Amino acid sequence: MAGVYIHIPFCRSFCSYCDFYSVTDCSETEALVEAIIREAELRSGYLYNETVDTVYLGGGTPSLLSVTQAEKILAAVRRNFIVVSDPEITMEVNPDDVRAGYISSLAALGVNRISVGVQSWDDGRLKYLGRRHTARQSAEALEAVFSEGIKNVSADLIYGMPEMTTADLKQDIEKTLTFPVTHISAYHLTIEEGTPLYRLKEKGKLTETDEETSSSMFMLLISLLREKGFLHYEISNFALEGYISKHNSAYWKQVPYIGLGPSAHSFDRRSRQWNVSDVKEYIRSVNEGKVSFEREELDRLTLFNEYIMTALRTVWGIDLAHVENSYDKELHDYLVNMSGKYIRYGLMKRERDTLALTDQGRMISDNIIAELLTEL
Ligand code: SF4
């Protein structure tokens, strides 16, 4: 199985924390849609004969697309790749883009999973994040999504903003759960270089949340969502039974995927490549019949390290049999030895042939993963 990711790099304005590639000049949306369709044609052989079972429209802001533009892109995906009859098709939407009839029209195109960028239920924190929408618009967007026929709905939340308390987070989670969402992605705010928040930090005008508060928030998130039946299947992702994101899980399991659009990444199990992060250059290159991209060949150790990085973030953990079969016995034994001390400290657990982080281990996952990476 394989996935298709489509990057729509337009935003009406920039959020203060975001370092994804996007531009606020949306005048080339139509030209971009045509270029994405052309790219799908040019690269129709990229996935060889792998069958596509997930399609993901992300960004940027894919909900800036008209229904006709989304339809053209999805038709191009179906024309140029081998797509199962009922793929998971996800679209990210910003709450202020949800207009009457938009979601039902997307559903008619086969979109069956919507991810709503709620981020916070507090207008002050939304403003701090530079979001254009209000809490009220998030509520209206979620109501519209459910009433217009989509049942598989994810809400994105951000926590760990300066001065945010665990009580604030509890309120955000409880408010989210007043809607029948089937999935929640909750990310701790990170201050990425080049963002407005980073510049504030440089000037000493931003104090990051201390580790103790961050840990309490993480544990609160896990316990509240578990109580409501959500499986904590990846560090930042929670799903009710049957609603794990197939598309994102495929990334973590090293399933191949093709990324269409500026800055989109692709992976074919041997190499990773990423399209140019420039709308004009992307459109120009595609129109000339060759996509502008960079490429990195992945050797065995890079693939192994990537597997450790992604697998340990998930509830499924590292499959030791997979390591022995796909890599070698030496790397298998290395992992068994290295994990010993973490198992003794209660940070990792071994069940049959899998190694996974415990809740305590997930709080310091970055440190553990960094130690397990190898140059063997
Ligand atoms: S967070 Fe989303 S809407 Fe905000 S700038 Fe980034 S891509 Fe655009």
Image (cartoon, rainbow, N blue to C red):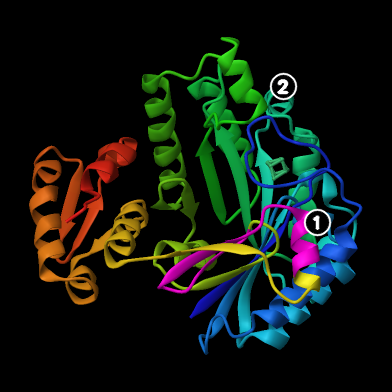
What residue lies at 55% left-to-right and 73% top-to-bottom? 3
Quarter of the figure with the C terminus: bottom left
Answer few, some or many: residues within 10 Å of disc 2's Cα (few below 14, many 20 plus, some between 14 and 19): few
Q: Is residue 44 above or below residue 363?
A: below
Left or right: residue 223 versus residue 51 is: left
- Residue identified by numbered label 1: 280
**273 falls in the magenta region:** yes
The mark tally for this picture is 2
Assign a secondary structure to mark 2.
Answer: helix
Read off the residue under disc 2.
124
Residue 372: percent from the left, percent from the top?
Answer: 22, 48
Residue 236 in the image, given as x and y percentages of width and height: 46, 46
- 96 or 52, which lies in front? 52
Q: Position of residue 164 (x, y in %)?
A: 55, 20
Q: Is residue 211 above or below residue 203?
A: below
Residue closer to the observer: 269 or 242 = 269
Residue 178 sits in quarter: top right
Q: Is residue 4 magenta?
A: no
